Image (cartoon, rainbow, N blue to C red):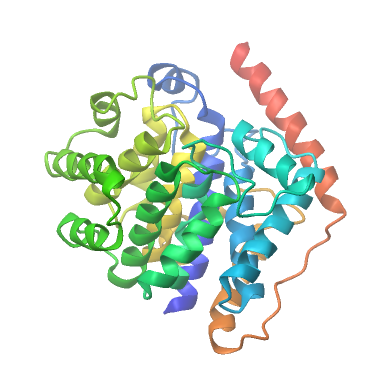
Amino acid sequence: MKADAYIGCLLGTAVGDALGLPYEGLSARRAMKLFPDTSRHNLLFGKGMVSDDTEHACFVAQAIIRAGGDVGVFRQQLARSLRWWLLGLPAGVGFATLRAITRLWVGFSPQNSGVFSAGNGPAMRSPILGVAYGHDPAKLKQFVKASTEITHSDPKAYYAALAVALAAYQSATHGAASADRFLPALSDLLTEDDAEELHDLLQHAARAAANNESVADFATDIGSKNGISGYSYETVPCVLQVWFGNSQDLAKGLQDIIKAGGDTDTAGAIYGGIVGAGVGKSGIPASWRSNIVEWPRSIRWIERLGEALAENEQSPATKCPRYFVAGIVLRNLVFLLTVLAHGLRRLI
């Protein structure tokens, strides 16, 4: 059922983001020393909050609904959301994303606002695009490229995001991952000559998964020595290595990613979005969902956004669910104070 895939993708993104956030930037060893119980939220007294990974995924979902299949409208709507998001004073904005949105505000078009970076921003936005447009390869490439170039102009960022989108589509349609199905499909989809490096990395990921290699060891093998880095050509192969080996048990896969350390919130969000599209809401532990404390874009609002995406396929006049926009600044202040308190806790 498509609605379950949309809802699962967005909720999986939120859960992976919230669970991984307290571990962000820690080495694998220090992460397990500070917060050894990866089966619960560790941000603040057993509760979790989401970061820009989930927020950007929701902006993409809203832009899909508003675009009516028109990639130009999608691009404009996503750029609009990102502009106003920055005015809400979000904490922890990636430097490339900050520069790109600033360029949007001073008049650059969404096609030319991206900066040369191969960070994870486009990859974290792409699972929901895979669920929406994976059935149409040409359209999928158009929308993933439009989403990417707003913030990142390095082709590597686009190639990595496209691989994530394809994985989410295959998860939504087949459930279980299969490297033998995914890799040829990606070769057919991503035919650019300079994408060979990514194809090689994902072949390596498939072999590592077949050999039951841990994601921490695989990350080291491909040069990411302090956990899963924020470079898309290291993050995405690590995420897909876990997905190849574990596409049905979201809880186990997320905990494996978190234990590897590094950019745990983004890696968790990408993995959660891919696997969530396959397992749906019921495949995401209820306690992980209920213990995310968010307002005004609550977990229930995120679920309603997934429902609206499914309705939009039947009725293009579907509207995005509303929320109290003026509450975002207050929410961001609470989030900032929570992150600072958590950082102090880590130091102590």
> Which image quadrant: the N terminus?
bottom left
* Residue 206 percent location from the top left of the image: 18, 45
- Residue drawn at x 67%, y 82% as measured from the top left: 318
Q: Which of 281 and 242 is in front in this view?
A: 242
Q: Nearer the viewer, residue 261 or 140?
A: 140
Q: In which quarter of the image is residue 133?
A: bottom left
Residue 9 as seen in the image, left or right of residue 45:
left
Residue 187 as seen in the image, left or right of residue 21:
left
Residue 287 as seen in the image, left or right of residue 338:
left
* Above or below 86: residue 249: below
Q: Is residue 50 visible?
A: no
Q: Which of 113 and 201 is in front in this view?
A: 113
Q: Can residue 170 be seen in this view?
A: yes
Q: Which residue lies furthest to the bottom in this view?
A: 315
* Above or below 188: residue 229: above
* Residue 298 percent location from the top left of the image: 69, 57
* Residue 293 percent location from the top left of the image: 68, 48
Q: Residue furthest right?
A: 326
**Mark count:** 0
Q: In which quarter of the image is residue 340?
A: top right
* Residue 199 percent location from the top left of the image: 23, 46
- Residue drawn at x 73%, y 37% as measured from the top left: 335
* Above or below 127: residue 338: above
> Which image quadrant: the C terminus?
top right
